[in-house]
Image (tube, helix red, strand yellow):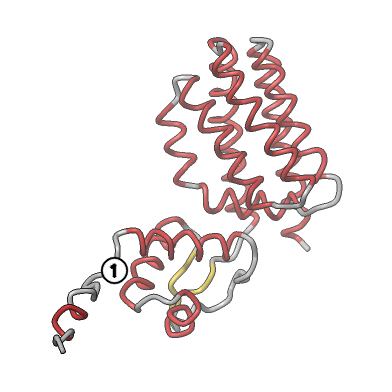
Amino acid sequence: MMDQSHDLSALRIESPPLTLRAMALDRLRRAIISGVFKPGQRLVERSLCEQLGVSRSVIREVIRHLDAEGLVTTEGQGPVVSRLSWDDARQIFEIRAALEAAAVEACARVADGAVKARLRQAVDEIETRAGARDWMAVLEATEAFYDTIFAEGGHPIAGEIVRRLNGRIAQLRVLTLGSGDRKVTGPRRLRTIFEAIAANQPEAAGDACRMHISEACGIAERLLAE
């Protein structure tokens, strides 16, 4: 009988696939944003290895990345989920109001049929997912909506700055989306922004964007105070 030991050993994967770290990063980021891991909660490497099925080296890389995003903070006893402070939130909303409103206005000036179709698709997806209370899908569709606006409005650097804050922005979005009427008014405000862009009305689009962010800011201030 043929010795199969050599053949079977050839099946072994000596190093994990390149996507393993990205998968672990995505899942842990989602768990933090959605509140599975609470602000201030310690992240224990051994537990995360078991929960995600990856090695400690992968977990350490993921935690370093989340630290750079601001979702994780390293304290005396190790990494913990960052706490959302009102001062941090206020600054994030101010940055968003300045950069997103400018990009929305620019996009409204130049948007053609193809751009409007992509934005309409994103807004439709936001409303559908919000109706199903699938907040992570709402976040993904919202990011696609703004990615199109930054790119087509000719504001790629502003888009890059906002994307660096996406983790903390997503935390704030989940916080405010789960609050009362925001389940309805948030998607409705995005629809208003889209309609102004579709009508190629920059001033109306910018005003709608600032109103959207101002409402979210007010809700976040109240919830973080509580």
- Which residue is pictured at 42% across the width and 63% down the height? 67
Q: Which residue is mark 1?
A: 16
Q: Quadrant of the C terminus?
A: bottom right
In this rendering, position of residue 147 left or right of residue 142: left
- The percent position of residue 60, horizontal first and vertical second, equals 35, 72
Q: Is residue 83 above or below residue 140?
A: below
- The percent position of residue 192, horizontal first and vertical second, equals 75, 24
- The percent position of residue 198, horizontal first and vertical second, equals 66, 15
Q: Is residue 106 above or below residue 96?
A: above
- Which residue is pictured at 21% across the width and 80% down the height? 8
Toward the viewer: 18 or 39?
18
- Which residue is pictured at 72% across the width and 37% down the height? 214
Q: Is residue 139 above or below residue 208?
A: below
How many numbered marks have been drawn onto this rendered protein structure?
A: 1
Q: Alpha-carbon neighbours of circle 1 within 10 Å: few (<14), some, or many (≥20)? A: few
Toward the viewer: 139 or 204?
139
Q: Quadrant of the N terminus?
A: bottom left
- Which residue is pictured at 68% across the width and 23% down the height? 194
Res 25 quadrant in image:
bottom left
Res 122 quadrant in image:
top right
Q: Which amino acid type corresponds to the residue marked 1 in the rendered image?
A: Pro
- The percent position of residue 208, horizontal first and vertical second, equals 72, 25
In this rendering, position of residue 54 left or right of residue 104: left
